[in-house]
Amino acid sequence: MKVAIIGAGACGLAVANVLCKTKIEYVVFERNKKPGSKILASGNGRCNIANDKVIDKKIKINYQLLYDFLAVNECPLVMDDEGRYYPLTNSSETVLNVFLKALKPHTLRLNCPVSTIKKQNNQYLIGDEVFDKLVLCSGSGAGIISTKRNVVYDYLTSLNIQLTTLKPSLVGFKVKENISSLKGLRISARATLYNNQKAIYTEDGEVQFKEDGLSGIVIMNLSYYYNQLKYYKNPQIKLVLNPNFDYNHLKSLEYALPRPLFDYLAKNNLKPDNLKFSILSTYDQSMAQVIAGGIPLAAINLDFSLKQDPNIYCGGELLDLDYPCGGYNISTAFATGFMIGENIKDSYEICNRIKDASR
């Protein structure tokens, strides 16, 4: 059996680490010059690899496979006050190196984008190489400019694989108000997403003001819930500045707020506990951390193979499966990779037992 793994990110490297311990041949095709670019970027270079909480069971995922792999390879994790796990070294390079150490150089094809895959006699041709199974885990268009997103998705057309609508997630918002005077300002706030005057989600954190909108992790998390809405009617973000501080006892806010923010509130007759901004849109995919949408979960079997072709497996960010910030997305990518690898290994072993029994 020979397996093609499309993408050397979290999912693809997890698959490869399962297969490298078997007699199954595999090749990992990576479009970039180096593997694991999003692993390295995770957690601002610290690799927020997982979260102690499980927030949404959209599909059954065995995260324990990831924890077991790290434990066996003696890569200890530490958890912060928010339940986020990081490697003890506080370096994403540690995590990437753990996943690369068992792989042989010839199995990893870097700077090798896959533009088309041809199915022929129940096998798959990539160039002039023949494969028995495919693992599609090429990631998403998050953080990629529009003119280069074809390298992520275009090969799916040759396999007749359809995607749901792709939308930027974990991303900032453009707002209607003129806030250019606040550009570059950061402040602690309680942010609430409203739609049709109904509060949808609230979270405390640091808000970053851009020339035409809002960003920061707390705002990015609002975008996840924004994408879950079935319709938009006067969507807004309300900010309560420094929510743990009571401004009411102050006669003036002049020295309680950064000067640009004080001037903005005074000019618009606003209070620090009731700043509202009308959402025009999210920023585009090039500024997003993940993408909402992808291969629909309804098209996937329990073993992550495609219902239309069980020899094709799909995982990681390519699936229509996304979460808020906090390690949920990368841990899901790793875990789906381990599950796919285990499922391929089981299939291979079953085939061998059948062959042995028939002799």
Image (tube, helix red, strand yellow):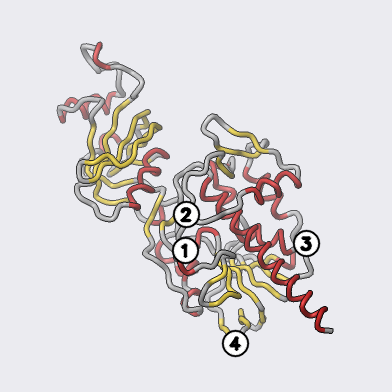
Q: Residue at x 81, y 79 (%)?
A: 357
Label 2 with label 3: CB-CB less than 8 Å: no
Left or right, residue 284 beside residue 235:
right
Q: Residue at x 69, y 65 (%)?
A: 108
Alpha-carbon span between mark 2 and mark 3: 30 Å
The image shows residue 18, relative to residue 220, as above or below, that is: below
Alpha-carbon span between mark 1 and mark 4: 26 Å
Of mark 1 and mark 4, the one earlier in the sequence is 4
Does residue 309 show up?
A: yes
Query: What residue would you read off at disc 3?
Result: 21
Query: Between 186 and 307, which is closer to the camera in this rendering?
Result: 307
Neighbor class of circle 4 (other Cα within 10 Å; few <14, some 14-19, many 20+) is few
Label 4 sits on a secondary structure element that is strand
Of mark 4 and mark 3, the one earlier in the sequence is 3
Left or right, residue 30 beside residue 354:
left
The image shows residue 247, relative to residue 279, as above or below, that is: above
The tally of labels here is: 4
For marks 1 and 4, give the one nearer the viewer: 1
Please tell me the numbered disc located at residue 177: none
Alpha-carbon span between mark 2 and mark 4: 34 Å
The amino acid on which the numbered mark 1 sits, given as a three-letter code, is Leu
